[in-house]
Every structure is written in structure tokens, then in C-alpha cells.
Image: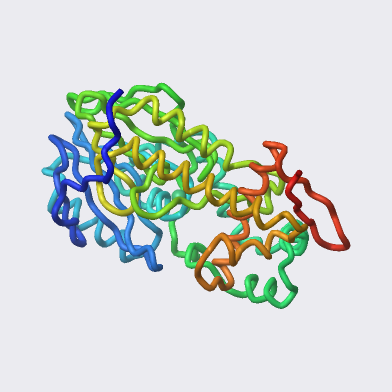
């Protein structure tokens, strides 16, 4: 059995600046768009076909990114149009420009069924605001009423404005095992979940490339959260199963092209690190729940930074995802006391 490499290898010395591209393999170009948060960039990819280009992920909505796209169209596309747009998953940094790009080129949007419909539902939910389902979810987890009100008031940078182009009203479905011929290369659709419901990854065996979206990131860990819309979900189970599946599918000499951080080699090591990370987090939950705990009481043990407003929303969702995976394993039980759920390690 081959020994796993002990560190990830990053083959590119620099990252593409605004409006620039780096060719990572013949006909495969890496570009970056800005994000208005501490994670300040998203990686996108351009695949050159015979008649036109395929864009993989689109950047967050807003004029800054659409202007950069126009610059790339003028400088980089060599007089070929964009003929299709793929979004790996529904999150706004991946889908935000899909409406603009699709309208600009009259090019179809390709997504999985789960991601397309979830993205459309999400855009309505952002306009609707809170509901009793949402307040109940957070109160059961132990969030104080004042915090809940502060969270409600903090508008997410993802919230669309009236000027933003909505997601295209039509799409082409991508499913597990589909094969897309782009130029001389065949790209296989591989579906993962946990971070989002039906996340598309693209694998080109010939070029030894894997466009991973947020399904595999080399430095940060993707958010794996339970949301108030599905309060009993167990996304971490799907996340861990996806990682095990990818571990068996992708050879270690494959260059991983992620949506954040830099392209890297060492996929099996990274997948193992991510599995270990979540197993360690679950062990922390087990250790803390030897006396019954509310979900919110676990956060200082799971996250070593101060959490406010929207960060509490994400962190609680992630904490609850770890609890639900342990419940599924029969290692934690839930009881209700007053308004709260309490979680206790099964001995
Ligand atoms: Zn994402």
C-alpha cells in the first residue's frame, strides 16, 4: 500500500489577480473573484471547448464581479462565446452571477436538481425574513432572545438587492455519472453532499484534474450545518460518506481545483484530515455532554473564537450537525426541558 504524502503540495507560486487567469492545464483556466467577507475570494474555472467556453461557478452578485467578468470576456476568451455555465452548488458566491452570465451569453445554466431548486427557494427565504420555525429552532438550542433579535437585524451580505439578476428560470440537470465533452476532454460529474444537498464536482481523468467546489477545500473547512428549514437533518453523515466515496475515486496524482484557497495535490491526505477534524469535534461533544447540555453551551468548546450574530447562526448549525451524527450513532440522546433541548452522552 502506498504511503500517503504527509503534506499538501501547492504547485502554483502565485494566484490570479482581478481580471487575470492562470492556465492550470491545457484549456483549463483558473480565475478569482472578490468576496466581501473574511474569506475574500472565490476560485472559478474556465474550460475551453471547440466552439465556446464553459464557466464553472460564477462569483457573488453585484457590479464589482460583473465588471470583472466583462473584462475577462474582452481580454481572455479569444473571440469564442461562453456556451454553458455550471454552478457546483447553490451558495450565493457560486450562483450570484449565473443570471447575469446566462442572460449576457444566452447560455444555459447546468446544475444538479437539488442545488437548482434549493437556490431558488433560498432567494425567496432571504426576502421573507424570519419565521417561528427559525426562532423555535434557535431557542431550543439555547439562544437568548436578545441574541436572536440581533441576528435577525444583521442583514447578510448575501441578501439580494432589486438590481441583482435572479437565477435563470430554466436549467439543464446534471446527475451523478454524467459525462460532459468539452474540447478534447471528458469531465465526469461526481456528486457529494453535506455542505449542500447535491454538490457537483467535475473529474477529468485524462488531465488528472478534479474541480471540487466547496466539497474539498485544502485550508479552511466547509460549513456543514443543520438549518431551521430542516431541523432534524443529518448533513454530517452525508459529508463523511461523500469523503469516503471520494477517497476511493480520485487518484492521489490528481490536481484538486477548489473554490477557495489554492489548487493542490494530496487529495487523500486532505480527505482524511477532514474526516479526522469532524471525528475530533464529535469527541469533544461526547466529552462535554457527560452532563446534559444545550447546543449553544458546546460552541466555546468547538470554536476557539468569539462568535457574533451571523457567525453564531453558522456555528450553531454546525454544532447541531455534530450532535445529530452522534444521535444517529446512538451515542447521544436528546431530551426536552422547558424551551430547550438537552443533549447527553449515552453511557
Ligand atoms: Zn458553499
Looking at the image, can residue 124 be seen? no
Residue at point 47%, 41% (across, down): 275
Task: Indicate whether 140 appears above or below 249.
Answer: below
Image coordinates for residue 171, horizontal then vertical, percent: 45, 36
Q: Quadrant of the C terminus?
A: top right
Nearer-the-camera pick, 183 or 167? 183
Q: Is residue 275 left or right of residue 66?
A: right
Colour treatment of the image: rainbow
| Residue 277 on image: x %, y % | 47, 48
Q: Image point 70% across, 41% down: which residue?
A: 331
Residue 170 x, y percent position in the rendering = 47, 38
Q: Foreground: 179 or 247?
A: 247
Q: Position of residue 149 (x, y in %)?
A: 69, 74
Q: Quadrant of residue 124?
A: bottom right
Question: Which residue corresponds to the image point at 30% horizontal and 23% vertical from the top-left?
Answer: 1
Q: Is residue 23 visible?
A: yes
Amino acid at each position: 500500500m502506498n504511503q500517503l504524502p504527509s503534506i499538501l503540495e501547492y504547485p502554483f507560486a502565485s494566484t490570479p489577480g482581478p481580471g487575470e487567469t492562470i492556465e492550470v492545464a491545457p484549456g483549463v483556466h483558473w480565475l478569482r473573484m472578490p468576496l466581501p467577507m473574511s474569506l475574500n475570494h472565490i476560485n472559478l474555472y474556465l474550460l475551453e471547448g471547440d466552439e465556446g467556453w464553459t464557466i464553472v461557478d460564477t462569483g457573488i452578485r453585484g457590479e464589482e464581479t460583473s465588471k470583472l467578468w466583462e473584462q475577462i470576456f474582452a481580454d481572455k476568451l479569444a473571440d469564442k462565446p461562453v456556451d454553458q455555465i455550471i454552478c457546483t452548488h447553490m451558495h450565493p458566491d457560486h450562483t450570484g452571477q449565473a443570471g447575469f452570465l446566462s442572460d449576457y451569453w444566452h447560455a444555459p445554466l447546468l446544475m444538479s436538481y437539488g442545488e437548482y431548486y434549493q437556490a431558488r427557494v433560498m432567494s425567496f427565504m432571504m426576502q421573507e425574513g424570519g419565521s417561528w420555525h427559525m426562532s423555535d429552532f434557535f431557542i431550543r438550542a439555547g439562544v437568548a432572545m436578545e441574541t436572536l433579535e440581533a441576528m435577525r437585524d444583521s442583514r447578510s451580505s448575501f441578501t439580494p438587492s432589486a438590481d441583482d439578476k435572479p437565477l435563470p428560470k430554466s436549467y439543464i440537470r446534471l446527475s451523478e455519472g454524467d459525462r460532459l465533452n468539452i474540447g478534447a476532454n471528458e469531465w465526469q460529474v461526481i456528486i457529494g453532499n453535506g455542505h449542500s444537498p447535491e454538490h457537483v464536482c467535475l473529474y477529468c481523468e485524462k488531465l488528472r484534474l478534479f474541480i471540487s467546489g466547496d466539497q474539498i477545500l485544502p485550508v479552511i473547512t466547509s460549513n456543514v450545518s443543520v438549518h431551521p428549514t430542516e431541523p432534524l437533518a443529518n448533513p454530517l453523515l452525508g459529508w463523511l460518506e461523500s469523503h469516503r466515496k471520494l477517497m476511493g475515486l480520485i487518484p492521489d496524482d490528481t490536481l484538486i481545483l477548489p473554490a477557495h484557497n489554492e489548487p493542490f495535490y494530496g487529495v487523500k491526505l486532505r480527505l482524511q484530515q477532514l474526516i479526522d477534524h469532524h471525528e475530533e469535534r464529535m469527541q469533544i461533544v461526547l466529552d462535554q455532554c457527560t452532563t446534559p447540555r444545550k447546543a449553544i453551551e458546546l460552541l466555546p468548546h468547538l470554536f476557539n473564537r468569539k462568535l457574533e450574530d451571523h457567525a453564531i447562526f453558522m456555528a450553531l448549525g454546525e454544532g447541531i450537525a455534530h450532535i445529530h451524527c452522534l444521535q444517529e450513532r446512538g451515542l447521544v440522546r436528546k431530551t426536552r426541558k422547558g424551551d430547550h433541548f438537552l443533549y447527553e452522552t449515552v453511557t
